[in-house]
Image (tube, rainbow, N blue to C red):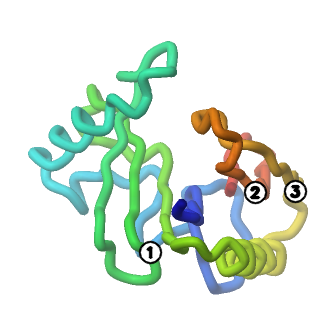
């Protein structure tokens, strides 16, 4: 079984104070950017179609499309972006960085702890929530989710 650390929205290293999530970057990319600045339209269309099967359980699986950049440069194994497929500008609504830790859960949790501490030291006055639970799409109960969320007053969040 693979252990996957998914860093939703961002990972950053400099001290920053922000009003909303669009002030942050993950590998130079921000929420609100056009995905067309990073991926060509043919790849966007192929990825959203291919990945749509992963969202069969949603009431409206076509509301958002997910596009991956695999073998991403930097510290991530892949990046993924949620866009609205009918948006001609392909504005990024969610940004994830993924790191795979094959069978190394402790390494994954240590990296998570490092990232959470970085967010806590860089941002002040954000509500913090922590949860651990079984992953919803694994009926075996062996897939675990360990999540920390930081909530902005405007509803944006880092998870």
How many numbered circles does the render carry? Answer: 3
In the image, residue 63 sits, relative to residue 89, either above or below, namely above
Depth-wise, is mark 1 or mark 2 nearer the camera? 2
Which part of the image, by quadrant, shows the C terminus? bottom right
Which part of the image, by quadrant, shows the N terminus? bottom right
Q: Residue 61's x, y, as percent?
A: 41, 22
Q: In which quarter of the image is residue 118?
A: bottom right
In the image, residue 110 sits, relative to residue 129, either above or below, namely below
Residue position for label 3? 128
Question: Which residue is depicted at the point 82% across and 80% down?
Answer: 121
In the image, residue 76 sits, relative to residue 138, either above or below, namely below
Depth-wise, is mark 2 or mark 3 nearer the camera? 2
Residue 146 image label = 2
Is there a contact, CB below 8 Å, between mark 2 and mark 3? Answer: no
Tag 3, which secondary structure?
strand
Q: Residue 132's x, y, as percent?
A: 82, 51
Q: In which quarter of the image is residue 29?
A: bottom left
Residue 76 image label = 1
Tag 1, which secondary structure?
loop
Q: How crowded is mark 3: few (under 14 residues within 10 Å), some or many (20 or more)?
A: some
Question: Which residue is depicted at the point 60% across and 38% down?
Answer: 138
Question: Which residue is depicted at the point 71% across and 83% down?
Answer: 15
The answer to whether residue 13 of the structure is visible from this angle is yes
Q: How far apart are marks 2 and 3 (CA)?
A: 14 Å
Q: Which of the two labelled residues, at mark 1 and mark 2, occupies the earlier sequence position?
A: 1
């Amino acid at each position: 079984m693979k252990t996957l650390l998914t860093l939703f929205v961002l990972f950053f290293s400099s001290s920053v104070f922000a009003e909303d999530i669009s002030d942050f970057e993950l590998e130079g990319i921000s929420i609100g950017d056009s995905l067309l600045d990073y991926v060509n339209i043919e790849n966007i269309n192929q990825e959203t179609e291919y990945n749509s099967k992963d969202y069969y359980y949603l009431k409206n699986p076509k509301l958002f499309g997910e596009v991956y950049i695999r073998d991403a440069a930097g510290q991530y194994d892949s990046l993924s972006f949620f866009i609205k497929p009918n948006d001609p500008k392909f504005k990024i609504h969610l940004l994830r960085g993924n790191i795979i830790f094959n069978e190394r859960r402790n390494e994954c949790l240590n990296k998570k702890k490092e990232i959470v501490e970085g967010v806590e030291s860089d941002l002040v006055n954000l509500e913090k929530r922590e949860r651990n639970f079984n992953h919803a799409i694994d009926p075996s109960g062996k897939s675990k989710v360990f999540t920390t969320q930081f909530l902005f007053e405007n509803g944006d969040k880092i998870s």
